[in-house]
Image (cartoon, grey):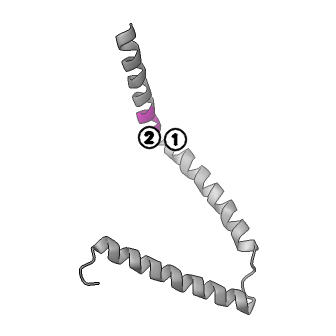
Amino acid sequence: MGDQSPKAKRTWEIYNILGEHEAKMQQLEAEGKLPKATPKKKRRVEQSESSEEVTSSSESSGNEGKRRVKNSVRKKVKLGPSG
């Protein structure tokens, strides 16, 4: 294991953390401290809300302008040889 790259080491660290987390969640579920279906539904709602926030923030940033430039350049390239 000493010859692994830093990325491989980090991957294993994350894998181990996720394994520990999964074990802890199963333990809490077995003890009845964690409802089975409710957290998943809440997470999905939070993810959809956060993804909407991300798209709206990216549209308000400079990314939208860059996309417009790229599209206009593509149109000019397509029209150039035919015109």
Q: Quadrant of residue 32?
A: bottom right
As drawn, 57 above or below 29: above
Q: What mark, if any, has residue 49 been given in the picture?
A: none
The residue tagged 1 is 59
**Furthest residue in direction left, as rendered:** 3
Residue 78 highlighted magenta (yes or no): no
As drawn, 19 above or below 63: below
Mark 1: which amino acid?
Answer: Glu
Residue at 70% over, 70% down: 40
> How far is mark 2 from mark 1, CA to CA?
6 Å
Mark 2: which amino acid?
Answer: Asn
As drawn, 15 above or below 80: below
In magenta, the rendered stretch is: 63-67
Q: Quadrant of residue 2?
A: bottom left
Q: What mark, if any, has residue 63 been given in the picture?
A: 2
Relative depth, front residue between 19 and 73: 19
Residue at 64% over, 56% down: 49
